[in-house]
Image: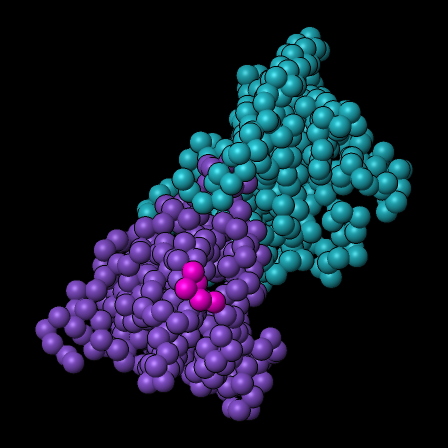
């Protein structure tokens, strides 16, 4: 149902529009990352930006994750508003010292003197048979680092709007984006812009069961909910969105209705498709679990 | 009036000589007092003394401007004092009192003062080098004329961050001074056991970074070398790598039995004590008299006591404030 008030775009295009708007809005904002310029972004999210904004604002960096993430943090200390793109969460492990020991600690350790207004974006997740080293999902780990704000863009609207709000934050924000969603199309309101990065969101209201998820789990859970609805089961879906500091209120309000835990299996992600798929909950797993829970009641 | 072992071509004024000597003696006495307070358990955690290396901080800081950014290591009391942080706020910080320069949150290893552009007190070896590059990058992007000076020990040169930072700084042509204080030991491991190439300044060539070394035991030599470095950085906008060869007279920290070096070696280096060297230079050029040194010692003694009194009178942050500044208010 496309009409004047909505816009059908891919998740990639949503990310691109958000970043474009950020670069237009504030000339202190610049993008730095591996292959963000001449290559157009590893996932083509910043394609055309170098031509439009120039080398000062769109900086290709060498393969030095600790070095360039640290430099992004330093530039934030000294008046800039960097968007640091770490191609994927997998490579961010090489920059962990900078993220944990510098970005996350400086404000508290300096007694409130030193703000670190850096935004770090990284792709995460599985789904392309990339095997263990390229299939990490370290959101839960990052969410346990005090001092960092951790957000997860599980919808097109959040892909479009989270960055803009993150760039207003005086504190470091890590935005997780998802390779598996890049080509997915969805409709967003045509005037979409900044979204809050404080609260979880109820993506679907229901009364029988709460599914609490984030990232690619959101659309998967919504699809599962349609199947369950045909069996007369009314599922509520919470998109956490902000993994730290977590919005307990929304969760508690929802699970006051019902609660069950559904999660992946903690293994290094294997290469074969069937094993990769089995590593995280799929649409059918969500349906099966929901049915089992309801039937056990 | 050439005299053995003493450079007599000192080209500084009496006023400046007195000021710099005062700073070096303040650092020395402040740290001796800190060591004493550590044994009394007034100061806890790690305490890394700078004694023996004072010429580097004082000589370098004198050549840096108010709008320059400074980043240092966990052995940074000297840099903080030379930068003009209040001795009382540093002592209070080491006491963990909220009147400290980091509200007592950081302790000895994490002295901060944003108003003095003093960005730590960074205690992960090599971890602050990328930030220094970023601060210099921000200066370039904003068209500022300031430089960023990053102090680190030779231990950091074995870290990947040194190599990444040198490459990035040269590639981006940013105004950063990488100032290595080579005190010959990374904790207890000597330079020869940790670096394949021990002429550290040679490493700059791999990145196309202008590099030099200087005698870090001689304040005037350090001052001259840093003036040359900053002039180069300001005129070209490019990075510079300066190695100041120096020596730490005290243990690495208060937990170090110094099994890795001979007392004889330490005694040999003590003959090159930077404070004695500088005061001799001033005396032999008849810029100061013995009375001047007594006056400085007297003033410093009062300053250090004032700092201790300030720290003693300080207060601890209420536990209810523990979560304050995890995120901005």
Relative image position of residue B45 (x, y in whole percent):
71, 37
Looking at the picture, tell me which residue is in the foreground, A290 or B168: A290
How is this picture coloured? by chain
Toward the left, the furthest residue is A4
Judge whether residue B237 can be spotted in this image: no
Relative image position of residue A185 (x, y in whole percent):
27, 80
> Is B24 located above or below residue A118 in the figure?
above
Colour given to chain A in the rendered image:
purple
Q: Residue B66 lies in what quarter of the image? A: top left
Looking at the picture, tell me which residue is in the foreground, A13 or B86: A13
Q: Which residues are magenta?
A: A255-259
Toward the front, the furthest residue is A297
Relative horizontal placement of residue B291, taking residue B121 as reference (left or right)? right
Looking at the picture, tell me which residue is in the foreground, B1 or A29: A29
Quadrant in which the N terminus of chain A is drawn: bottom left
Give the prevailing secondary structure in the magenta stretch.
loop
Residue at the spot 85% in from the left edge and 33% down from the top edge: B267
Residue at the spot 51% in from the left edge and 91% down from the top edge: A273
Residue at the spot 72% in from the left edge and 55% down from the top edge: B198
Question: Can residue A75 be found in the magenta stretch?
Answer: no
Q: Give the chain coloured cyan.
A: B
Q: Residue B89 lies in what quarter of the image? A: top right
Relative image position of residue B134 (x, y in whole percent):
45, 52
Judge whether residue B7 can be spotted in this image: yes
Residue at the spot 64% in from the left edge and 35% down from the top edge: B108
Question: How many dots with numbers?
Answer: 0
Relative image position of residue B159 (x, y in whole percent):
64, 58
């Amino acid at each position: 149902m496309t009409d004047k008030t909505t816009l059908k775009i891919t998740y990639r295009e949503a990310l691109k529009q958000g970043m474009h708007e950020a670069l237009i809005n504030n000339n202190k904002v610049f993008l730095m990352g591996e292959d963000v310029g001449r290559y157009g972004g590893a996932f083509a999210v910043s394609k055309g930006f170098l031509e439009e904004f120039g080398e000062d604002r769109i900086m290709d960096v060498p393969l030095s994750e600790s070095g360039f993430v640290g430099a992004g943090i330093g530039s934030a200390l000294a008046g800039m508003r960097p968007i640091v793109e770490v191609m994927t969460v997998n490579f961010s492990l090489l920059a962990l010292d900078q993220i944990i020991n510098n970005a996350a600690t400086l404000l508290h350790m300096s007694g409130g003197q030193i703000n670190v207004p850096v935004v770090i974006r990284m792709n995460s997740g599985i789904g392309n048979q990339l095997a263990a080293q390229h299939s990490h999902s370290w959101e839960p780990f990052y969410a346990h680092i005090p001092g960092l704000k951790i957000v997860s863009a599980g919808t097109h609207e959040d892909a479009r709007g989270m960055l803009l709000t993150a760039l207003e934050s005086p504190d470091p924000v890590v935005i997780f984006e998802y390779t598996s969603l890049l080509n997915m199309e969805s409709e967003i309101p045509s005037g979409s812009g900044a979204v809050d990065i404080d609260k979880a969101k109820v993506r679907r209201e229901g009364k029988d069961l709460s599914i609490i998820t984030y990232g690619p789990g959101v659309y998967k859970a919504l699809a599962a909910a349609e199947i369950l609805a045909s069996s007369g089961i009314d599922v509520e879906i919470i998109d956490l969105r902000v993994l730290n500091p977590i919005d307990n209120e929304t969760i508690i309000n929802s699970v006051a209705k019902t609660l069950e835990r559904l999660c992946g299996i903690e293994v290094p992600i294997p290469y074969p498709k069937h094993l990769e798929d089995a590593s995280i909950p799929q649409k059918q797993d969500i349906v099966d679990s929901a049915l089992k829970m309801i039937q056990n009641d | 009036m050439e005299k053995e072992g003493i450079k007599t071509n000192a080209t500084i004024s009496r006023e400046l000589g007195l000021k710099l000597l005062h700073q070096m003696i303040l650092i020395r006495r402040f740290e001796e007092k800190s060591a004493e307070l550590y044994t009394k358990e007034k100061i806890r955690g790690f305490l890394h003394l700078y004694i023996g290396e004072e010429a580097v901080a004082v000589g370098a800081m004198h050549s840096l401007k108010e709008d320059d950014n400074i980043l240092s290591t966990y052995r940074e009391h000297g840099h903080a004092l030379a930068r003009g942080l209040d001795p009382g706020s540093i002592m209070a910080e080491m006491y963990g009192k909220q009147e400290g320069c980091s509200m007592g949150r950081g302790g000895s290893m994490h002295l901060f003062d944003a108003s003095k552009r003093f960005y730590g007190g960074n205690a992960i070896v090599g971890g602050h080098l990328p930030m220094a590059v970023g601060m210099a990058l921000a200066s370039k992007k904003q068209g500022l004329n300031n430089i960023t000076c990053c102090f680190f020990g030779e231990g950091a040169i074995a870290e990947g961050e040194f190599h990444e930072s040198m490459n990035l700084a040269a590639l981006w042509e940013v105004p950063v001074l990488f100032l290595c204080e080579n005190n010959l030991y990374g904790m207890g491991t000597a330079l020869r056991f940790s670096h394949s190439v021990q002429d550290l300044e040679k490493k700059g060539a791999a990145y196309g970074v202008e590099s030099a070394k200087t005698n870090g035991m001689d304040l005037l030599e350090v001052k001259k070398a840093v003036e040359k470095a900053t002039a180069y950085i300001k005129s070209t906008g490019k990075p510079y790598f300066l190695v100041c060869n120096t020596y730490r007279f005290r243990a690495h920290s208060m937990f170090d039995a110094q099994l890795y070096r001979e007392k004889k070696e330490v005694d040999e280096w003590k003959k090159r004590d930077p404070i004695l060297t500088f005061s001799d230079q001033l005396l032999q050029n008849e810029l100061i008299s013995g009375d001047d040194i007594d006056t400085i010692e007297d003033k410093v003694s009062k300053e250090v006591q004032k700092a201790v009194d300030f720290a003693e009178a300080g207060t601890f942050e209420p536990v209810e404030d523990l979560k304050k500044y995890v995120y901005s208010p």
